[in-house]
C-alpha cells in the first residue's frame, strides 16, 4: 500500500523537525527533505512563507496537502494509517499522559528555546 509522496521542510537543528523525522523513520515512511538554513532566514523567504505563513519549521507536504506544526504533523502521520508502527498508546490513560507530555513540550520547552532564538536574531540585526 502506497501512502503517497512526503516532503518535509525542516532544519536539522530544530527539535520540532527532529521529532517529525523520527516519526517518519519509525513508521518507515519514505520522504524527501528540503533543508532550510534558519540562521540565513530561509524560513522567512516568500517561497517558504507560501508553504507555512508562520515562518517556522517543520512543514509537511503530503501529495500537495500542507500540514504545519510538528505535533499536528505527528498526529496526522499517526492518523493516515493507525496500524503503521503506531506511536499512540491504545490505553486511554496512557494516551492522555502522552498528550500531556506533547503539550508540555509545545507550550513550555519549545517556546523557551524559540524565545532565545528570536532574541539572538534581533540582536544580530540591530546591534550597534
Image (tube, rainbow, N blue to C red):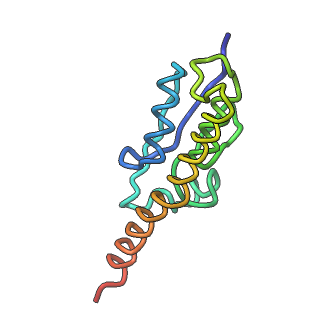
In front here: 48 or 74? 74
Residue 4 x, y percent position in the rendering:
66, 22
The residue sitting at 64% across, 41% down in the picture is 96
Q: Residue furthest top?
A: 1
Image quadrant holding the C terminus, namely: bottom left
Q: Is residue 126 above or below residue 95?
A: below
The residue sitting at 66% across, 25% down in the picture is 90
Q: Is residue 83 above or below residue 123?
A: above
In front here: 57 or 34? 57
Q: Residue furthest left?
A: 128
Residue 12 x, y percent position in the rendering:
37, 44
**Number of on-image labels:** 0
Picture quadrant of residue 106: bottom right
Q: Is residue 115 above or below residue 82?
A: below
Q: Residue furthest bottom?
A: 128
Residue 63 x, y percent position in the rendering:
68, 30
Q: Residue furthest front?
A: 93
Residue 126 x, y percent position in the rendering:
36, 84
Left or right: 35 in relation to 100: left
Left or right: 41 in relation to 72: left
The residue sitting at 64% across, 29% down in the picture is 78
Picture quadrant of residue 62: top right
The residue sitting at 56% across, 34% down in the picture is 7
Image quadrant holding the N terminus, namely: top right
Q: Is residue 67 above or below residue 90?
A: below
Amino acid at each position: 500500500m502506497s501512502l503517497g509522496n512526503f516532503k518535509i521542510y525542516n532544519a536539522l537543528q530544530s527539535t520540532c523537525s527532529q521529532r517529525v523525522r523520527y516519526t517518519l523513520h519509525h513508521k518507515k515512511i519514505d520522504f524527501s527533505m528540503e533543508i532550510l538554513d534558519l540562521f540565513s532566514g530561509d524560513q522567512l523567504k516568500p517561497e517558504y512563507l507560501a508553504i507555512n505563513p508562520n515562518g517556522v519549521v517543520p512543514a509537511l507536504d503530503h501529495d500537495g496537502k500542507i500540514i504545519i506544526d510538528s505535533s499536528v504533523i505527528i498526529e496526522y502521520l499517526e492518523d493516515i494509517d493507525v496500524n503503521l508502527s503506531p506511536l499512540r498508546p491504545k490505553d486511554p490513560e496512557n494516551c492522555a499522559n502522552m498528550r500531556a507530555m506533547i503539550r508540555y513540550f509545545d507550550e513550555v520547552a519549545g517556546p523557551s528555546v524559540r524565545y532565545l532564538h528570536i532574541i539572538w536574531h534581533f540582536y544580530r540585526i540591530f546591534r550597534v
